Structures are given as C-alpha cells and as structure tokens.
Image (cartoon, grey):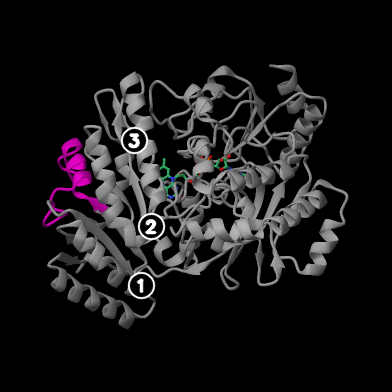
C-alpha cells in the first residue's frame, strides 16, 4: 500500500485500498473516457469525507496535489465520475435513509443510496421523488443531485433542483456547511466569517453584483428548459433570499462533496393512464406537441423510427406486437397521473381528438396487457445504450442535447441529416415534452476514422442545438466531454465567470479536477480505445 493510502486508512473508519484491480475498475464511468485513480476510499461517515478533504488541502498548501472525485453509481456519461488521486465511493456505506416523514413530505438521505432503492421505500409510503433518471437502478441520489438529473416525469415535475430543501456539503478544505435560503441579515453574517465558507459567500456575492447584466444576457440566450452547462449562477438570488444550493446542483462534485440531502416528496398515483401516439411525420410532431403539452402529461417520451428499426434488428422479439404501426416516424409515450380520475379522462379525450385531427395512431392502455406493452416500449429506450454492431458500440456522444420544444422537430430533421452525412442512421429517443434528445452514434473507438467522425458529429450537433437556443447538457452535465464547449455556450466572458466560481470554492483545484475545465486536447488524450460498461462487483459488503 502507498504511504498516502496507508495514512488515510489509519485515520478513516471506512476502507482504503490502492489495489490495481479496484483502481482499474474505477478508471471508467459510462463515458468514453478513462483515468485511473491512485487510491479508493469508501467513506463510512461524514467525518471520513471531511478528513480526506482536509488531508488533500494540507498537501495542496505544500504544492502537492491529491485530487478527490466523488462517485456514486458511476453512470455519468460526460466523464465526470473518474479522476486521478482519490476516488471517494459513496455506495458502500453512506447509503442510508436518515429520516422519512411522509406526513411532512420530506426524506433525508446519505448520497450513496440508489435512486431506485429510495424510490421503492417512498412508494410504500404513497410518495415518490419524481426526477428519477433512466439509470435509477444504479444511479445514486448524490450523483443525481450533482448532475441535477431529469427523467421521464420531468415534463410535469421538473428536475432534482425543485426537490432539494437542504444540503450538507464538505468543502474542499474539509469544512462542513449547510445550504438553504438566507435572508439579507443571515447573508451578512455568513460573509463576516473568516472561514472558507465566509470567503465563498463574499466571492459569489461579489461575482453576482459585478456581472448582473452579463448573467441576464446569457440566461436569455438559452431557451431550452434544462441546461447544466457551467454553474447555475442564475438562481442564487431569489425572492430576496440568497441560496448557494443551485450552485451545487449540476456542479458535478467540483465545488463540494454532498454528504446529506433533505428532499421534498410528492404523492404518487399508481393509477395513471398510459397511451402511445404514433405520428407519420416530423411536421405532425411540430403541430401536435403544443396541444399535447397543454393536456399536462406526466410523461411525454419519444422514440423515432430508426430507433425501432435498430432495436428490432438487434432483438427481433423485444418489441414484437407492441406497436400497431412500427413504421411511423415518431412514437410518443404519454402518461397522465392527475389524482382526479376526471382530469385523466379529460386529457385522454383531448388526446383522442388530437389524434383524429393529425391522423396519428393512438393506443390508450385498456388493461394490464396494454400497459405492459407500453412499458416495454418505454423501457426499450434504456437498452439503446447497449447496442453494438461488430466492434462498433452505441457511444454516449452528443447524447444529452435539449432544444426548445418549438424547435424539436427541426432539430430532429437537421440532426438526422448530420448523421446521414456521416453515413449513419440516427436512432433518437428522449424526453420529447422537454425537448431533450438522446442519440448515440454506432462507432468503433479503436478506428481513427471513427474517432474523427465522432468529433465532427459532436461539433455539428452541438452547433445546431446552440443555434436553436438549445443547451448541450440537459441533464448529464459538462463533465470533461463538453468542457471544451463552455466558451461556445456562454461566450468567453461568461466562461471566465464560471471558472471564477470554481476558484472561489476550490482554489487549489482539488475537487473533480478537470471536470468542466478540460481542454479538447485533454479530452482526446483520455479517450478509451474500446467502449463498454461494467457491473459494480468491486464494492465491499456491509
Ligand atoms: C443508461 C443510462 C441512462 C441514463 N439516463 C439518464 C436520465 O434519464 N436522466 C439523467 O439526468 N441522467 C441519465 N443518465 C446519466 C446518469 O445516470 C445520471 O446523471 C445519474 O444521476 C448519475 O448518478 P450516479 O450515482 O451514477 O453518479 P456518478 O456517475 O457516480 O457521478 C455523477 C457526478 O456526480 C458527482 N457525485 C457523485 N456523488 C457525489 C457526492 N456525494 N457529492 C458531490 N458530487 C457527487 C460525481 O463526481 C460526478 O461528477 C443516464 C446514464 C446511463 C448510463
């Protein structure tokens, strides 16, 4: 064991290892990049997190860098859950529900609990946490907060940020803070502190004061509903309060390590109505989407024809008998979960009228068999990530774009042309109701030609989205993959302001070093030569 690993193990309750096998395992997340960490820490409690950060900070004061990467399920597709130095894995021990109050509709959890496990508990209490990602079986709450996740229910319920009441965060120097809305008086008290916390409040307040006009300008440029690029400086000052919470959501572990979160819950209605509306053209989608959204669906997901073709080729029995007209251009999966049955029926009526008007084919689930079929279609999208053809794999590249919904059809049309230009078919799926489009090109990372195709495709898709007022990171964040685009998204002045935020919180660059700051050259140098996702077998038990 290295001297540093030995030292940490002496001082921490949780396990520490520098075994090569384990380090190799944590060298990957779900992105196409790789970095091998030098030490793995499985913190047992907040004190372990605090001590590790403190140790790293003290090394940094002596010009030695030991970066720390927080890690949940490692399902990040932007290359943000990998790093050199310490890999701090929360799934082993810090995975508990600390308090659950269905009456007052909140839950307090540690970051390493998986979204799926928490949700199962919440369902038994008649509640749920709506913005669950498609990866919720293995994605954690910590990772979902750090990425500010969105999911199939976000069309009605929004993103993780809407459910956070309070965060406990370990800062880069090991200080522990709690976030939440502060009055002017409380803010002044915080700004008077001589600690890192005090300097953060002073720094961020100053940054907001100096850049008011720039921020307003940048905010108005992006019309997409979800945008995780940079740091959310836009929502810190609200209703006369000052709250650091929005900065941590979507920060991908670069500003602090979340050790506890109190989250708001919503009543869950298991008796929702499900339907599939299949449309023959993108123009029909363009015309129908505003009317569909006015019916207030709790889900509005999509799969295009190429996605159905790809799924069927790979597994001919997966969707057998599920769709009446698989040849339609776009299939929308819709759900209405209003607690009043009358409201659900009204929405379905509206949908039927719309289908008649557009000539689309509508299937409303009449019983369990139909519901199973629709759920099969819904889940099929998640298997798109696992597609392969020979050595070529469906790669998570340009896979998290969001455009304003009034440009969704245009974007799908233009993106398909870009794919066709590279000799590829574009299978697309995602959250149509939020304009979130997922596509993954089938390419072989070992082939130089395919890598070049990948860079070109990424550039073209991103430029198209930005020109339509879209964002490049609807949910998965900049990570390393999209860090080089930060200047395109916001302009150089605003990019600098985003980097100032990082310096205010983490002046030595300890936390998730390289995430949101990597250059295009760095990203290229970290590229894997073979893409694949692994299980989670290297976790200690107990
Ligand atoms: C098949 C598939 C489907 C997906 N579907 C969706 C989707 O529908 N919606 C969506 O939003 N995303 C989706 N994602 C992306 C990803 O799964 C989510 O962002 C997920 O919430 C990440 O959780 P995780 O536990 O795996 O985090 P990780 O991958 O471990 O980490 C993600 C980021 O969070 C940071 N982090 C982790 N824990 C902490 C902590 N305690 N404190 C501070 N920072 C921390 C990490 O450093 C990293 O930057 C999908 C990914 C895959 C592979």
Numbered badge on residue 457: 3
Q: Is residue 288 magenta?
A: no
Residue 359 at x, y percent in the picture = 12, 67
Q: Nearer the viewer, mark 3 or mark 2?
A: 3
Q: Decide if residue 487 is on the left or right side of residue 360.
A: right
Residue at 61% over, 26% down: 84
Instruction: Locate residue 397: give its quadrant.
Output: top left
Q: Nearer the viewer, mark 1 or mark 2?
A: 1
Instruction: Locate residue 16: give its quadrant.
Output: top right
Residue 275 at x, y percent in the picture = 24, 65
Residue at 33% over, 62% down: 406
Mark 1 and mark 3: span between their CA atoms? 34 Å
Which residue, given by chain and number where applicable, does mark 2 sit on?
A: 152
Which residue, given by chain and number where applicable, does mark 1 sit on?
A: 296
The residue nearer to you, when weighing 205 against 432, is 205
The residue nearer to you, when weighing 206 against 386, is 206
Q: Circle 2: is it few (<14), some (14-19), or many (20+) Cα within 10 Å? A: many
Q: Can you say which quadrant of the picture contains the N terminus?
A: top right
Asked if ligand 1 lies within 8 A of label 2, the reply is: yes
Q: Is residue 315 magenta?
A: yes
Boundaries of the magenta span: 303-326
Earlier residue among tags 3 and 2: 2
Q: Are marks 1 and 2 in contact (CB under 8 Å)?
A: no
Earlier residue among tags 1 and 3: 1
């Amino acid at each position: 064991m290295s001297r540093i690993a030995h030292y940490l193990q002496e001082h921490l309750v949780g396990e520490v290892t520098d075994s090569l096998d384990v380090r190799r395992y944590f060298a990957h997340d779900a992105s196409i990049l790789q970095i091998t960490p030098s030490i793995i820490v499985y913190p047992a409690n907040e004190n372990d997190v605090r001590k590790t950060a403190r140790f790293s900070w003290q090394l940094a004061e002596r010009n030695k860098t030991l970066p720390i990467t927080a890690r949940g399920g490692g399902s990040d597709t932007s290359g943000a859950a990998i790093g050199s130095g310490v890999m701090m894995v929360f799934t082993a021990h810090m995975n508990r529900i600390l308090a659950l109050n269905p009456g007052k509709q909140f839950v307090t959890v540690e970051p390493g609990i998986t979204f799926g496990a928490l949700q199962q508990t919440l369902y038994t209490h008649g509640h749920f946490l709506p913005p669950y990602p498609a990866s919720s079986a293995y994605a954690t709450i910590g990772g979902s907060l750090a990425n500010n996740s969105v999911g199939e229910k976000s069309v009605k319920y929004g993103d993780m940020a809407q459910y956070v009441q309070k965060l406990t965060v370990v800062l880069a120097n090991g200080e522990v803070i709690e976030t939440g809305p502060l009055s002017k008086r409380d803010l002044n008290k915080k700004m008077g502190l001589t600690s890192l916390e005090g300097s953060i409040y002073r720094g961020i307040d100053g940054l907001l004061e100096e850049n008011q006009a720039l921020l307003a300008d940048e905010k108005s440029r992006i019309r997409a509903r979800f945008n995780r690029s940079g740091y959310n400086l836009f929502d810190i000052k609200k209703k006369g309060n000052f709250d650091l919470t929005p900065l941590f959501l979507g920060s991908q572990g670069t500003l602090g390590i979340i050790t506890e979160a109190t989250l708001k819950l919503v009543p869950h209605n298991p008796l929702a109505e499900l339907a599939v509306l299949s449309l023959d053209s993108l123009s029909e989608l363009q015309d129908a989407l505003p009317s569909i959204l006015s019916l207030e669906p709790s889900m509005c997901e999509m799969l295009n024809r190429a996605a159905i073709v790809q799924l069927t080729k790979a597994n001919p029995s997966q969707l057998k008998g599920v769709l009446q007209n698989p040849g339609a251009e776009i299939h929308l999966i819709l759900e209405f979960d209003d607690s009043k049955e009358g409201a659900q029926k009204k929405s379905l009526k509206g949908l039927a009228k719309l289908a008649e008007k557009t000539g689309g084919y509508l299937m409303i689930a009449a019983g369990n068999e139909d519901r199973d079929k629709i759920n099969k279609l819904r889940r099929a999208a998640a298997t798109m990530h696992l597609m392969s053809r020979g050595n070529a794999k469906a790669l998570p590249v340009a896979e998290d774009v969001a455009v304003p919904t009034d440009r969704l059809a245009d974007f799908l049309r233009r993106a398909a042309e870009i794919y066709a230009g590279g000799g590829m078919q574009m299978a697309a799926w995602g959250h149509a109701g939020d304009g979130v489009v997922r596509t993954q090109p089938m390419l072989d990372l070992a082939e130089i030609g395919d890598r070049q195709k990948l860079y070109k495709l990424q550039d073209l898709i991103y430029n198209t989205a930005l020109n339509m007022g879209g964002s490049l990171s609807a949910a998965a964040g900049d990570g390393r993959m999209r860090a080089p685009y930060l200047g395109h998204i916001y302009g150089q002045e605003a990019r600098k302001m985003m980097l100032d935020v990082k310096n205010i919180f983490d002046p030595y660059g300890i936390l998730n070093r390289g995430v949101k700051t990597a250059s295009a050259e760095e990203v290229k140098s970290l590229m894997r030569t073979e893409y694949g996702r692994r299980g989670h077998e290297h976790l200690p038990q107990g």
